[in-house]
Amino acid sequence: MNTDGPDVGCSGLDNLLLAGRQKSKKMVPGFSISGTDGEGNPLNDEDYEPILRTGNDPQKPKNNDKRAVVRTRYVSAELHIREKLFVGVIVKGDVYPESTTIGMNKTLAHHVSKIVFFAREKQEPTPENMEIVSLGVDQSIMSVFRVWDYIETHHGNDFDWYLLIPDTVYLYGGALMDFVGHMSLGHDVYMGMPVLEEDKEITYCKKEAGYLLSSNLMQKVGSHWTECMERAWSSLPGLEVARCIKQYTGVHCSNSFEGSVYRAYNFQDKALSPRDFEDKRLQNALAIYHVIDQRSMYKLHKFSAEVALNRTYKEIKNLQASIEESSQYGPPESRKVTWPTGYPPPFNVTTRFEVFEWEYFTMTHIFGTSDQEPKLPLTGADKLDIDEVVTTSMGRLNEKYADAFTLGRLVNGYRRFDPTRGMEYTLDLELKMTSQKLKKSIQKRVHLLRPLNKVEMIPMPYVTEQTRVTLIVPVQVDSQDQLKVFLDFYTRVCIEANDKSSLMMIFIYSPAQAQTMASEDVFGKLKGFISYLEKKHSEAQMSWLSVKTTVPSLVALMDVISTKFTDNVLFLLTNVFTELSVEFLNRARMNTINEWQVFFPIPFTQYDPNIIYNDTPDPGHITIIKGSGIFDKSLYEHASFYRSDYVTARKLWDEKHPGVGTDHIQSDLDLFEMFLNAKVHVLRAVDPALKQRFKERFCRPTLREDRYHQCLASRAEGLASRSQLAKLIWSSEKDLDVRIKTIQRKGVVH
């Protein structure tokens, strides 16, 4: 060991760490220290004591007092991006179906960023789609300050503007959002209908008409609402709020800011007549107060919506005229204005694979929707669509030609969907003249466009791909071999990849099989194979359950399974013919939201391999191509939902069908319809990661007639494509002709 210099070296001791401690009088023989300390003073052996540390006892890192940066979950919170408008509504009485509170919620809630109702007591049950906060006080002074204190505590940094109104004020949401959208931020704004209190030298906002506060003002006053409530002495809530705002910001109430004027109209419980709507004060008012009747509130909303719609149509016409006028000054390739003016031009086709097909229709049938069904009856949404298009065409023609025509018949109809514009229609109409002098028929061709709406971002609850999912797989006797294939997929995708999932298999016994279960279990070998997998993969979470039933419907099975789990369990119903994949599991996790949404994916089902691979070898896996299978929209046996949502939906189903058991529930579609009647969203979408091997479908004759025929049609469509079936029939007839000719040559048949 070399100790000649100030550095101490250790050779051959790779697992040792040398450290030192100053100001020690105790020495270890064999070590000599020289050099200076951090202040420049010389060191000797008496000033330094070495300490020997091993690799299992490392020196602790120094604490440099640097805290780790904690990032927020959302970018909007980190960048302080706020929502536009918060509306607080003070409820005077009880919330009942005919109250103005319900009318305000229905007419305003879908326009503003957030609306909260403040009542003296919280009602049970809470009305649907309403957030009600209980104040617990009767005094109006205390109530208004408690409202503002609640807003500051829970939403103080979330919005740009804060509006407080009583439940007797009508506000048109579209005009309100335009009003706050045209005002700058970063100013102390206290806006409403001003009232001057000369004795106190304060101008306050009339609380009956509502008043608006900016976020900048809220940050200055927000922490002082409780203090202001304790110092309040008058009986006017609006005056006390104004005193508090003036004390900490020096701002008085004003009805204008940057050219925007807060106008209010005193309704005074009027019995509305058509002449009242001609009043310019009513037409220009932002807030209409003293509306104590829900019916009047709906009439005001109808009037406001019509005014806004007419204004929008006028703006559209002005913009179209401006586009047509200015287009002549553009480059040559942009001078041609496409119809309708202002909408994107039709999609420019570059190859034959990008051509959008036209569907031909009459008033009774539609043609060309799919290769499987070239002609379909015009029913459901398609019929409503065509009827509306024909009615709109006749309305515009009579508007242009002064009611000169009545509809004779639809000669030809064509439609196609352009993803850049919307649904395009071309109609050939046979029209009859309404004039007594001109009794003849003429034909006119009209073009229509149903444009795509503006894309809207819908807020959804936060979910992750780390949620544990429990797979539920029903197993019948004739699908035991296929379960082994499914377990191979599960082992590779879930167990070996450490996926957060568990598996429960439901062995379905018939009454006869259940009686012989003790002596001869039809699933005995399969249960032994599962036990082998559990021993081989000790970390795997696999279980099985035996069920005896004559009708193995999904609802009947879930009634049994749901009693074995807690409410927060995510179920994924599937079958043994599924080719399991990580993408499918993650999509089920992301599309299933507790108390919000359930997911029913549409699988890609394989055609019968004996037909499609008659001349070629079976590749052993499913590829999504035209000749290998179809997305079967009639299958509802794949579903993901939370146990709590299932229990809630089941209770609602029993309430609508009292005294009816599960014997009548025989179709998988019943589970889907049960969730449709529940208070959750139902997402039904094609899932390319969900691939299902071919299986022979059995249609129970005990099904409802419409569902029985639907099952037969789905079973036929799932065999193969029309061209493959035609080829099979052609080859079978050809082989039969060859055999007959061979027998005739041998003289057996004359």
Image (tube, grey):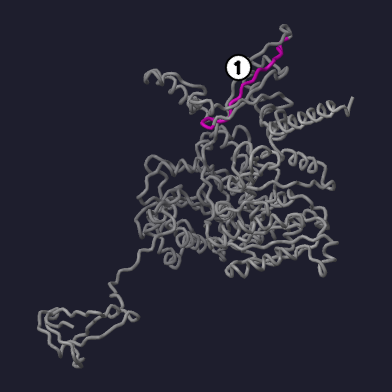
Specify the quadrant that holds the C terminus: top right
Q: Is residue 635 left or right of residue 84?
A: right
Q: Is residue 645 left or right of residue 111?
A: right
Specify the quadrant that holds the N terminus: bottom left
Residue 320 or residue 635, whichever sits in front: 635
Residue 311 or residue 421, whichever sits in front: 421
Q: Position of residue 142 (x, y in %)?
A: 50, 64
- Whether residue 429 appears in magenta in the rendering, the answer is yes
Query: Pointer 1: what residue?
Result: 400
The residue lying furthest to the top in this view is 437
User: In the rendered view, would you say 377 is above or below 430?
Assistant: below
Residue 430 sits in which quadrant? top right
Query: The disc labelled 1 sits on which kind of residue?
Result: Lys
Q: Is residue 740 left or right of residue 323?
A: right
What residue is rendered at 36% in x and 60% in y? 247
Q: Position of residue 553 (x, y in %)?
A: 76, 54
Please, what secondary structure does the residue beneath circle 1 have? Answer: helix
The residue lying furthest to the right in this view is 750
Residue bounds of the magenta highlight: 419-435
User: In the rendered view, would you say 398 is above or below 4?
Assistant: above
Residue 300 sits in which quadrant? top right
The answer to whether residue 94 of the structure is visible from this angle is: no
Q: Is residue 249 left or right of residue 93?
A: left
The answer to whether residue 12 of the structure is visible from this angle is: yes
Instruction: Characterize the local packing of mark 1: few (<14), some (14-19) or many (20 or more) Cα atoms within 10 angstroms.
Output: few
Q: Position of residue 194 (x, y in %)?
A: 43, 48
Q: What secondary structure is the magenta-colored segment mainly?
A: strand
The residue lying furthest to the front in this view is 746
What residue is rendered at 87% in x and 27% in y? 747
Residue 544 or residue 305, whichever sits in front: 544
- Whether residue 308 appears in magenta in the rendering, the answer is no
